[in-house]
Image (spheres, rainbow, N blue to C red):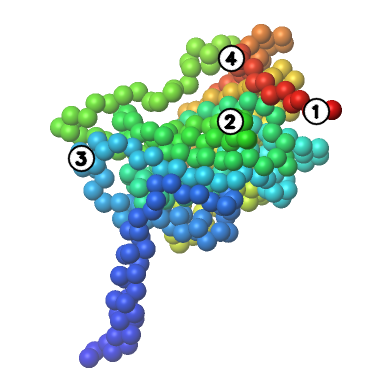
Amino acid sequence: MEFPWLIVPMVLIALILPFVFIWATWDHDLFRSLPALPGPLDRGSKEFKIRCAISNWVRRGWTSREKLLHPCPRVTLQTKFYILDHEITSVRGALGASDKDITAVPLMFPQVLCGHLLVQLLGNSNFPTRVDTMVWKRLHVTQLRRIEVDEELNCLMVLLSKQFTAEGIEFTVQTDLFDEESVVWQSSLYLVVPHKIPTKMAIPLRGPTNPIDTKLLESALDQQSQRFPLNCSKERLSDFDKGGAVDIESLSIFRTPEPRATFLWMAAAASSVIEKKQGESLSYPIACHCSLDIPLKELPRIPNLHVDVHSKKDEPQGLIGFTVGLDTKTVVSGYIRSVRWKYQEEEKVVDV
């Protein structure tokens, strides 16, 4: 034989491949319960990152009309939610916020800390499409009351729906944090898998789910503005990832991608500035709705960003608009406002 040294590696590959195939195509349960939020070093986090990265090869046939018209599977993950000191310190440092008096959880922090839980949802074998080309388009967050840093809550993340749009297949992922009585924080993520649906499939296209309210956005931006720099550096972006954030658009099998300014980082940095500079004009419950206006691939990995905060004194709705920009381009736009209904904690009665 001309190449006898090839025999051993070929035999090893032949023995390993069946196990790799079984692992890659393993069916998961639609509902999974975890003891705690997964972190970046957990074995499960690494496994599901790989599953997301190879989804193009193992989720075959999803572009057929029959598969596309299947109802959206209700993939559900449940876990306990509590914050470790180093996580909130890392994220605060990543956003340039002060780590003094860390007693309450800022608006976007729960979404950051749930990054690896989102990876497990996207990597679940029941997710109906490939996810290696997925892009994050919009984010809607509502917080009903102040959340203490040492407070333990329950977390529920659900793949809620899918919709066919001109951009591709849009998925809604909803995350709820709740105590023993009710939901205290909720987010909705709107993720798009780019896919051109052929006309011959006769699948009707719709607009995006829960789009940003353009009238409210225009009203929010039609106010006096102040500009603040968003100090974006490689060190801060690395700290952001250490806090639990995951760049779902850059998952890879072979390498850890260089940190970059993601949609979530920009939204979190902007809301952090608003809470610091204009927080007194907001009262719970508060809601934030924002959207990405420029694809991340068109931006430098570490851009020189700024945020323009639009607000008026004595604004009756507690409405604050913001835009994250690069030079003259608007990258992210959105608003934060106080909603009109009030959250009331149940009155505690103590027997004496």
Q: Can the viewer see residue 98?
A: no
Indicate which label's residue lies in the foreground, 1 or 4: 1
Residue 66 badge: 3
Give the image quarter of residue 225. Answer: top right
How far is the residue under mark 4 from the one under mark 2?
Answer: 27 Å
To which residue does mark 1 refer? 351
Describe residue 5's horizontal placement relative to residue 110 as left or right.
left
Quadrant of the rendering where the C terminus is positioned: top right
Looking at the rendered structure, the kind of residue marked 4 is: Ala
In the depicted structure, whether residue 61 falls above or below residue 217:
below
Residue occupying the point 24% across, 89% down: 2
Q: Nearer the viewer, residue 197 or 115?
A: 115
Q: Amino acid at mark 2?
A: Val
Work out whether mark 4 precedes mark 2 in sequence or the reverse, and give the earlier one. Answer: 2
> Disc number at residue 183?
2
Q: CA distance from mark 4 to mark 3?
A: 43 Å
Mark 3 or mark 2: which comes first in sequence?
3
Give the distance between the C-alpha atoms of the residues marked 1 and 2, in whole angstroms.
28 Å
Q: Residue at x 53, y 13 (%)?
A: 216
Q: Which residue is mark 4?
A: 220
Dot 1: what SS? loop
